[in-house]
Amino acid sequence: MGLAMALAAPCAHAADSSKTLDKVEVSGAASSDRKDASAAKTTVSAAELNRFGDASLVDALQRIPGLSVERSSSKGAVVSLRGLGSGYTQLLLNGDPMPQGFSIDSIAPQLIERIEVLRTATSDMSNQAIAGTINIVLKQTSLKRRGELKLAAGHYEKQFSPSFTVDRSMGSERFSYGIGAGLADLRDRWPSSSVTQSTVLGSTQPQRFQNDSSEWRRERRLNLMPSATWKPGDQQALTLNGLLQRSWTDFEAPDVRTALAGDPVLFPIDRLVTSQRADQLRVSGAWKSPVGESARIEAKASHSAVTRTTRSNFYATAADASLLLSRDVGSTLRDRSTLLSGKYSHGLSSDHALAFGWDAEFGQRAESRDQTERSPVGLPTQDLSESYTARISRLAVFAQDEWELSRQVSAYLGLRHESLSTETVGNVLDAVHSRSSALSPTAQLLWRLPDTRGDQVRLSVAHTFKTPTARELIPRRWVVNQNSATSPNFQGNPNLRPEEAWGLDLGYERHLRGDAFLGVNVFARRIRSVVLNRVQFVDGAWMEVPVNSGNAKVLGLELEAKGKLRQFLSTDADVDLRTQVARYWSALSALSGPGNRLSRQPPLTASLSADWRPAGSPLTLGSSLVFRQEALVRMSPEQTVRKSNRALLDAFASYKYSKDITARLVLSNLLAQDERQTTHYQGTTVDERTELLTSTFRTVRLTLDIKL
C-alpha cells in the first residue's frame, strides 16, 4: 500500500509527489479509513453522530465506542476516553487545542463534519493526551451546492426544548463558501434529595439534616459558523472558518433544609438565582501549498475569545421566611488566545516521508468577582472584590518520520518538545509564575499479517503529559454556599507540577467486508506526579487543594465489533450492529485501602446499538444501550466517593418521506434511573457522610430533516 493512502489519514503527516499531494487535497473520505491510518483511531461521521438527532453534543458523544460521560447535574458533564477525564483526555477543535472556557457542548451536533478518536499520541498534535485525543471537526464548505435544515423539539417533565439548525454551502471549482446556524432553547431539571450526617470525633451527638433541592436551568443559544475556501491552484488552498456563539442562561436552585438530629440548621431555606450571558468567538485561517514536486507547506492561524458575565443572588431565610443572609455576586471572565502553527512535509520517496513543524499559543485570562453580603439578624458577613489576570504561553516544535518499510510493515517515529509558561497577578494574591516543559518521543508500528484479508497488529509507545489548569494553579478561593467536609471550598496551588506518563498500546484488528470490524486493544500507562485533591479545615472553613501525590498505574482491555448482522449470523435482515466492552484498572502509590482508583475511573463500560431497515420500507428503527459501572473511589486518604451504576437506553424511529425529507421520533433515557452518590470524609476530627439522590426523566424528541 502506497504512502498516499497513509497520508490521507488524519494522523499521517507528509507528502511524497505531486500526484500524492493532489490525493491529499481532494480525498476527504480517505481520512476516515480506519484500516490505513498510521495511528489507532475511530472516525465517527456526521450521519452516525446524528442518528438520534441529539440537541446536545455530549449526548451524542456518550454513544461513541471508548468514550464515557460523567454527569453532575448543573455542573455539566466530563467526557472521558478510556474512563480518564479531568484533563487526561485531550480535546481538539479542527485539530487545535480547545481554548480555555470554550464549551464543546454549545456546538450543535448537526454542524459537525466528523469526530476523530485517537487512542495514541502523534507528534504533530499536542502530547497532552495521556488517555488519548478527541478531535471535533466542524463542517467545511463544499464545491457542490449543499443545504440541510433541521427542526426539532424535545419534551420531558413539563420541559419543552425546541431547536433549529441550517447548513448551506455553495461555490465553484475555485471558490466555495457556506454558513451554518443553530438556535436552541434548552431546559433541564435536577430534583434531588440528600442526607448529611456529621460527627465531631469524641462527641456522642451527631448533626444530621436533610436537604431537598429542585435545580433547573434554561439556556437559549445561537450558533453561527461561516466558512470559505479559495483554491488559486490545483494543489493550493486558503480556508477561512468562523464560529460565533452567544448564550443566555438562567439557573435556580431552591433548597429546603430540615434538621433530623442535633442542632437546628443555620439556613432552613435558601435560594440561589443565577443569570449568565456568554459569547464565544473563534476565527481561523489555513494555507496549504506544494513546494517543488515532493514537498508541501501548511500554515495556520486562529484567534479565540470567550466573554462571560454572571450575576448571582443567594438568599437564606428562616422557616417563617424572614431574611437571615443575602449575598450578591457579580463576576466577569475574559479569555483571549492566539494560535500560530506551521508544518513542512517532504517525501523522500513514494514510501518514506519526513515532516517538521511548530506551533505557538499566547493567551490571557482575566476574571473579576465582586461580592456583597448583608444580614438583618447580625450573622457574620464578608464583602469581597477580587480580580486576577493570567498570561499563558505555549511553544512546541516537532519532527516525525513515516516509513512504509514493506507491504506488510509501516513505522512512525516522532519527537515533540513542548514548553508552557503561566504568569498570574491579582489584587488579593501574590504573583505566581509557573514554567514546565516536556520532551515527548512517540513510536508506532503497523504490521499487516500476511496471507490474511485484513488482519493487522498495532504497537505504540509514547511519552505524554498533563499540565495543571489555570484554576488549579491560581491560589484563589472558589466558595460554595453550604461549606462542609463533603462540600468544601476550592483553592488552587501554584506549586503544582505537570503529570507525565509513559504509555504502551497493543491492538489486534480484523477488517472484514464492507466496514465490518473486530478489534481488541490492551494498554498500560505509568503516570508520575499524579494530582489529588486534599480536603482540610483552614481558617474556619473546609478547603479542597490539589497537590502532587506520587505515581499511578493504569491498565485497560477494550473489545469492539461492528458490521452487518448477516456477517455474523445466517439472516437476511438488514441490521447494523455496534458493540464495545472495556475493562479498566488503576492504582495510586499515595493511597491505600479500598477504592484505590484514578480520577473516578469506571471499572467497566459497555455499549450496544443496532439499526434495522425493514426490506422495502422507508422506516429505520434503532436503539442504543450504554452502561457505565461505578465503584468506590478514594479521592484522598480521608475522602471516598461512590456512585450508582448508570444504564442509558435510547431508541428512535426515522421515516424517509422522500430523498430530501426525513422525520425522526426519539425516546431517550427510557430506564429513567435515579442517580445515587455517597461522599464520605473521615479525618482526625470529623466524620461526615452525604447521601445524594438525583432524579432523571424520560425524554421524547421529534426532528424533521430537510435537504435544500
Image (tube, rainbow, N blue to C red):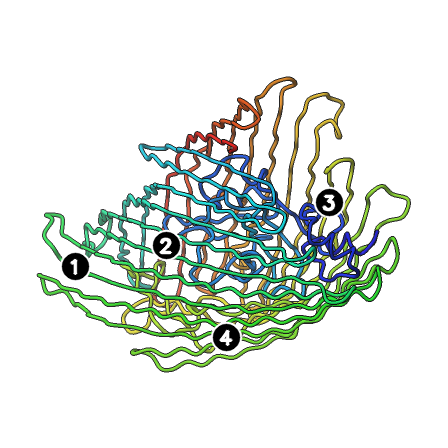
Of the residues shown, which amino acid type is indicated by label 1?
Ser
Q: Which residue is mark 1?
A: 326
Circle nearer the N terminus (4, 1): 1
Question: Which label sits in the foreground, 1 or 2?
Answer: 1
Horizontal arrangement in the rendering, residue 174 relative to residue 201 (left or right): right
Question: Which label sits in the foreground, 4 or 1?
Answer: 4
Tell me residue 501's x, y (percent): 63, 67
Of the residues shown, which amino acid type is indicated by label 2?
Arg
Circle nearer the N terminus (3, 2): 3
Quadrant in which residue 573 is drawn: top right
Q: Nearer the viewer, residue 706 or 613?
A: 706
Of the residues shown, which amino acid type is indicated by label 4?
Ser
- Residue drawn at x 76%, y 50% is 36
Q: Are discs 1 and 3 less than 8 Å apart at CB? A: no
Of the residues shown, which amino acid type is indicated by label 3?
Gly
**Badge 1: residue crowd in 10 Å (few <14, some 14–19, many ≥20):** some
Q: Which residue is mark 2?
A: 689
Tell me residue 365's x, y (percent): 40, 70
